[in-house]
């Protein structure tokens, strides 16, 4: 693969990554095909990146944000080059900002998408560039700075994952049994993952007896992706159907429910994959401790509470068909919200790279935001 002259490439990671920046384009591991086929797709422009995010080629809040950052680079290069060829290159930033708005619409719930795009726009803001390029601005240097920022976003997430794993695993005792929901591992992040990172670290420390992974209807992130990742890492894992979670917690020793999130509101409410809320309710009922593990990029202090979080609704067919085969009556309809909101009161620990918050609430979250700002 050829890298461009001002290319910044993803450093060699010591963990598996599903998002590879090649300097000239992006490569995504197609998560729709896992675990049966490992197929990489080349993403060369904004439209392909939007389609990949919407169709869940790439998914998981941090991985969506990282992909969006690289999509901003691809869009800027295309705009700048096309305009330069036409001899009217001053106004490409206004078109690029419109591209960013389109990218923002790709999926509504994970705040990392918005956060990453805002971070990319800050590169132009910091250079004093609004809708126009002023005379004397070095466009190549600007494009290079955008690429550098995207790589930084990916590297920061990698480092945050390591810290999350350390902080979260320290809360576990030896011989712990953990239930997790959805997929929060390397496929969903730049590193070892959030909730899965904690699990993997606890396993490495000899603290883990058993992991149960909810299969995560309807898209099966748990049975297709989490089981596959944990198996690769030698972590003992059994899949359960989502509806078995209550009975699991009632009848077996489960010490922890550990999940990631797509957005944490300022009051500590947590949006995550549909089914998280019911698992958290049952965990509280049965005295199972709950841990939500997120990079700070998933905390959105501008969202006052979970009531303000837009919950993505996806197509009926994801529920009513299985592997392309219709299982319900032709013409039947499904309501398919793919996230839910767990009230902060059900969260025992919020683990971020900035620190651990027990019983998170608005005051504690805002204090952590201010401390580290
Ligand atoms: O629809 P998805 O697969 O993008 O949903 C992913 C989740 O809900 C994850 O739990 C969340 O993004 C955290 S990933 C570290």
Image (tube, grey):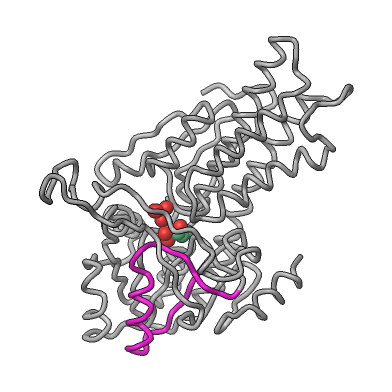
Residue plotted at (78% across, 25% down): 139
Q: Can you see residue 226?
A: yes
Q: Quadrant of ligand 1?
A: bottom left
* Camera-nearest residue between 97 and 168: 97
Residue 44 position within the rendered picture, expressed as x and y whole percent measured from the top left: 51, 26
From what the image shows, is residue 139 above or below residue 277? above
* Camera-nearest residue between 277 and 241: 277
Residue 300 position within the rendered picture, expressed as x and y whole percent measured from the top left: 61, 63
Q: Can you see residue 184?
A: no
Give the left or right position of residue 49, taking residue 215 as reference. Answer: right
What's drawn in magenta, residue-wise?
A: 267-293
Residue plotted at (81% across, 34% down): 129
Give the left or right position of residue 113, taking residue 234 as reference. Answer: right
Q: Which image quadrant for residue 7?
A: top right
From what the image shows, is residue 291 above or below residue 62? below
Which residue lies most toward the top here?
A: 86
**Is residue 99 a member of the stretch shown in magenta?**
no
From what the image shows, is residue 118 above or below residue 103? below
Residue 175 position within the rendered picture, expressed as x and y whole percent measured from the top left: 36, 82
Residue plotted at (65% across, 66% down): 301
Q: Which image quadrant for residue 203?
A: bottom left
The C terminus: image quadrant: bottom right
Residue 215 position within the rendered picture, expressed as x and y whole percent measured from the top left: 26, 62
Residue plotted at (59% across, 66% down): 163
Task: Tally the numbered discs.
Answer: 0
Q: Which image quadrant for residue 77?
A: top right
**Is residue 286 a member of the stretch shown in magenta?**
yes
Which residue lies most toward the right here?
A: 136
* Camera-nearest residue between 110 and 287: 110
């Amino acid at each position: 693969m050829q890298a461009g002259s001002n290319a910044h490439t993803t450093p060699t990671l010591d963990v598996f990554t599903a998002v590879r920046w090649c300097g000239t384009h992006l490569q995504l591991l197609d998560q729709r095909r896992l675990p049966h086929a490992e197929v990489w797709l080349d993403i060369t422009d904004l439209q392909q990146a939007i389609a990949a995010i919407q169709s869940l080629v790439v998914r998981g809040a941090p991985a969506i944000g990282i992909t969006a950052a690289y999509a901003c680079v691809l869009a800027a290069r295309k705009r700048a080059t096309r305009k330069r060829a036409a001899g009217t290159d001053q106004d490409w930033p206004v078109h690029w900002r419109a591209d960013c708005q389109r990218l923002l619409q790709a999926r509504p719930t994970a705040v990392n998408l918005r956060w990453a795009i805002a971070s990319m726009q800050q590169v132009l803001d910091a250079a004093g560039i609004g809708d126009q390029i002023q005379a004397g601005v070095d466009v190549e240097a600007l494009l290079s700075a955008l690429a550098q920022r995207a790589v930084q976003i990916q590297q920061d997430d990698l480092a945050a994952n390591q810290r999350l794993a350390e902080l979260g695993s320290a809360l576990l005792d030896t011989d712990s049994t953990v239930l997790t929901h959805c997929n929060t591992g390397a496929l969903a992040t730049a590193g070892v993952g959030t909730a899965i990172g904690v699990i993997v670290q606890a396993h490495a420390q000899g603290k883990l007896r058993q992991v149960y992974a909810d299969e995560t209807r309807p898209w099966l992130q748990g049975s297709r992706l989490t089981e596959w990742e944990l198996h690769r890492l030698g972590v003992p894992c059994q899949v359960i159907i989502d509806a078995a979670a209550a009975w699991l917690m009632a009848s077996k020793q489960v010490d922890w429910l550990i999940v990631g999130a797509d957005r944490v509101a300022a009051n500590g409410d947590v949006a995550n994959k549909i089914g998280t809320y019911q698992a958290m309710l049952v965990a509280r009922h049965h005295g199972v401790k709950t841990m939500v593990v997120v990079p700070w990029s998933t905390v959105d202090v501008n969202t006052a509470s979970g009531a303000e979080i837009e919950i993505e609704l996806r197509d009926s067919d994801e529920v009513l068909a299985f592997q392309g085969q219709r299982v319900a009556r032709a013409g039947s309809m499904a309501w398919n919200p793919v996230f839910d909101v767990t009230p902060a009161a059900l969260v025992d620990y919020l683990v971020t790279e900035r620190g651990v918050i027990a019983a998170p609430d608005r005051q504690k979250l805002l204090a952590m935001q201010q401390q580290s700002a």
